[in-house]
Image (spheres, helix red, strand yellow):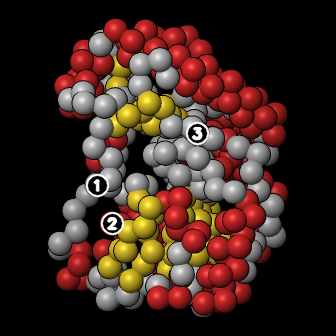
Amino acid sequence: MDPDAIRAVKRVPHGSSDDPYILDFSANTNPLIPDGVTDVYMSALHDARTYPPESPTAYRAAAADFAGCEADQVVPTPGGLAAIRLAIETTVQPSDSVLVPAPSFAEYTREVRLQGADPVFVTHDAIPDTDPSEYALAIVCNPNNPTGECYDAERLRSFAASCREAGTPLLVDEAFLGFTDQPSLAGTPGVVVARSLTKLFGLPGLRAGFAVATGTLLDELVAARRTWNVGRPALDVGTYCLEREEFVSETRQRVAEERERMRDTLSGHYEVHASDAPFLLLDVGGRNIAALVEAVRERGIAIRDATTFRGLDSHIRVAVRLSKENDRLLEVLEDV
């Protein structure tokens, strides 16, 4: 990390509300968690009296089964963002250029700038058609946040091959891929995959995630990873969650059904982007976004002002929650 850059880089906005009286559609986390999580967490507190295992074998094995890779390719991290930072720290130097999608997750830009490097913005859906040879790193988000759509699997694999031929590492943020049945790029040579347990398992405060890489990229991630970087409760709960196949299947089905129902209703009032993710991006035209967000909040609901994403100036983003909660959102958005 570049010391001079640290003093110039600011924080970026995110969704989520900690107000217990607000129904939060601004953060894209599952409103449900797997049964049994509380018992696993409480049991892990006793084991937290000693340092967590190094390396955490059970967690890596569960993550590998979940992502479809080898256990020795998994690098545990305290959340998906930590995996993203680790990947950028080990591949990017000051004055490098990094290929960054837009609109997309703003932390990519922040992490690149913290390294003293320069983000070069390309429309997110055009990234796979871009020549990666002039960049120290290329980044994609699949499905993309905030637009919601997945890349075509073969197109993304072809881009990964182009990056490999150019000697440019590819960072793929798969934070929302677990909500789909799309294949992961985990274990693909030349690729670092970042995964999070936050979104799919509804545990943003747990801070559990992992990176996956091979070859030299893997060696560098392992060398740079901090010892004991994931606490014992997060490791034990994470391992348990990653093995809950029925919960994942039920979540995917519920989100897909609710998302399409919401999209059908909202399309009568707004331009709604197609999505494979647990959220929808809405273009509300000439509406004052700040006023709209505030009006919705006065009705007890938080939505995401998406104008903070590069290139969006008339958009909001809403999560897909449970059916009755979604009904309430639809009622409010039709009325404000």
Q: Is residue 33 left or right of residue 242?
A: left
Query: Relative to residue 148, is residue 231 depicted above or below?
Result: below
* Residue 194 picture quarter: bottom right
At mark 3, the secondary structure is loop
At mark 1, the secondary structure is loop
Decide which of 326, 300 is in the foreground and name it: 326
Under mark 2, the amino acid is Arg
Circles 3, 2 touching at the beta carbon (< 8 Å): no
Under mark 3, the amino acid is Ser
Under mark 1, the amino acid is Val
Give the number of the disc on residue 12.
1
Circles 1, 2 touching at the beta carbon (< 8 Å): yes
Q: CA distance from mark 3 to mark 1?
A: 24 Å
Q: CA distance from mark 3 to mark 2?
A: 25 Å
Q: Residue at x 25, y 30 (%)?
A: 286
Give the number of the disc on residue 275.
3
Q: Position of residue 186 (x, y in %)?
A: 72, 67
How busy is the neighbourhood of tag 1: few (under 14 within 10 Å), some, or many (20 plus)? few
Quarter that holds the C terminus: top left
Label 2 sits on residue = 110
Circles 3, 1 touching at the beta carbon (< 8 Å): no
Decide which of 263, 278 is in the foreground and name it: 263
* Residue 82 in view: no
How busy is the neighbourhood of tag 3: few (under 14 within 10 Å), some, or many (20 plus)? many
Q: Residue at x 60, y 90 (%)?
A: 166
Of tags 3 and 2, which is closer to the observer? 3
Which of pointers 3 and 1 lies earlier in the amino acid sequence?
Answer: 1
Q: CA distance from mark 1 to mark 2?
A: 8 Å
Which of pointers 3 and 2 lies earlier in the amino acid sequence?
Answer: 2
* Residue 320 in view: yes
